[in-house]
Image: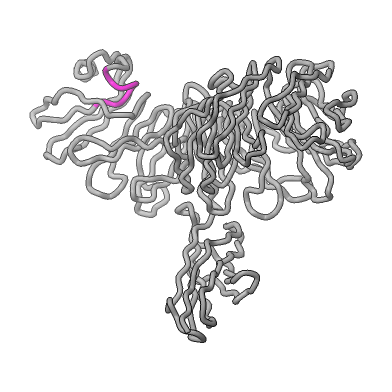
Amino acid sequence: MDSLLMLVSGATAATSVAVGDLNGDGNLDMVVTSTGVSHAQNGNGAPGILLGKGDGTFQPVVFTSGAGRAKSVVIADFDGDSNLDLAVGGRSAQICLGKGDGTFQPPVNYAVGDVTAIVAGDFDGDGKLDFGVLTTTGLFNSALGYGDGTFQAALVFSQGRGRVTLADFNKDGNLDVAIPGSVLLGNGDGTFQPPTNNGANAGGSFSSAMRAADLNGDKNFDVIVGNRNIETALGNGDGTFQQAMTFFAGGGSEVILADFNKDQKLDMAVPTGGLVNILLGNGDGSFQSPMNTGLGTSATYVESGDFNMDGRVDLIATGSSNTYLLAGNGNGTFQSPKSIGGPGIALRAADLNNDGKLDLLILSGQSFQVLLGNGDGTFQPPKTFGQGTTYSEMVLKDFNGDGKLDVAAMNNGGNVSVFAGKGDGSFEPRVTYIVGAPGSHLANGDVNNDGAVDLVVSRPAPYSDLVLVLNRRGISSAMASSPNPSTANQPVTLTATMSASVRGSGTPTGTVMFKEGTTILGTAALNNGKANLTVSFKAGTHKIKPIYSGDTNFNTFIGKVFTQTVNP
């Protein structure tokens, strides 16, 4: 290896070598990953390309752009264009598609874990190359290929870290991503524009709270960031923000927004140590000085809701010793805390069994407990789920479209565990999705407009990036008709096509209802993803909407309105 290291100036150890003809000149070339090379030389740990001269010597090393922290590399043609590509393992797996001249396109990062070794092969026998990685935790994770250089794996889509929230900040109908100090405007297809400043960071990437809400009643989403202080930045409705305002709350690990004094203005609850600070909102994005409600013990998380069904917003706070209910008085003050459960690191409140009463989920670290509410501020004995790993954060949403709330929780393996809800307060066993970094933060929303809720994961240092986990139950739809335009009373065949929004997820089955306004034109079964219905129309312009029924693998979906023009 000594002579190899001499080719890569400054390297102290070659960690991986791959050989192939990268520029099509008939000579073998080398790709080397190594340690000890300065960041200025190799672009933050990028692999080195050494083009062969055919006589056992090589041209000077050139480092690939953007593919950093490399520990392992493999050469293969992942997109079938006869040009060799690179799969590079580091803090993620990076795919660099070759141009055929020894240079490569910018890398695409997949969150498959902290990689020590990477291999390529057709693991599922479909004739398309896949890649697999061995991680620092000893796991082997694989990503199945589509044959075009893309893979079935969670995608790293931006740098950035800290708590994350989703909202439509520029009113284009697409969800955007906000992290402390930055916003990434969504394109509606699961991709995002480069980050821009949102004006509020309250401690930068270490901020421990992040919310989006309309604080001043202008129908624009604003951002709220908490750490040592609370900062708010009012949105302009176009994805930009006004200068941040700062409010002292003694520091806070979480921020909850609700109307505690029934004045139609959002207020804040912020737990700090043994206190819950209440900041009453002025309705213009600013807040009054905090009022303290004592707990007598440390609290790290709060949740709000009307747990005793008296029309007033209550608080539940949890921490290292117990979970407490603070019944609201309806004027921004609260009654003395009442212990209702054990310790927790996160809370979620929702009606899990559809009885009209708020229930409670307490994430305790080693599991989560469900406390079904009685509607009077008391709860039934806890039931425990998710044992067998450690969790750091959770979100509650209907991910599989069955009308029942599910739980997604970050586990200590750096992955997301999803528990499908049964609708009675209990949950199915976990299904795990790889994101490759413990201590990550979660947000959820339909970022690609396919009718299925996705996950956005903010990974901490040393990753410091954002990962998108697309829900594979989503639908992409298209509609056509023949003829169009038609004449009055002429038979017209409407065709709706339903396909998986995430490739490799299968073909939807079920039915499609064709609807004009409130009138149902008819329903047709899908055959190979297509549903046909023949109808006739009176003269005029007709707006038709396809509504997909869903099946065991795909959520229900409402397609875009289609226009049928009918001449006299």
Foreground of the two, 100 or 401? 401
Q: Quadrant of residue 155?
A: top left
In the visual, does 494 lie left or right of 96?
right
Magenta-highlighted residues: 41-48
Q: Is residue 196 visible?
A: yes
Residue 396 sits in which quadrant?
top right
One can see residue 384 in this view: no
Asked whether, in this view, residue 279 is left or right of residue 546, the answer is: right
Quadrant for the N terminus, please: top left
Q: Residue at x 61, y 43 (%)?
A: 431
Q: Residue at x 25, y 40 (%)?
A: 98
Residue 501 in the image: above or below residue 282: below
Main secondary structure found in the magenta portion: loop
For the rendered model, the colour scheme is: one colour
Query: At which x and y percent is residue 317?
Result: 79, 26
At 14% from the left edge and 26% from the top edge, which residue is drawn? 58
363 and 170: which is toward the camera: 170
User: Where does residue 381 sit, x and y in percent of width and height?
Assistant: 87, 36
Q: Position of residue 126 (x, y in %)?
A: 38, 54
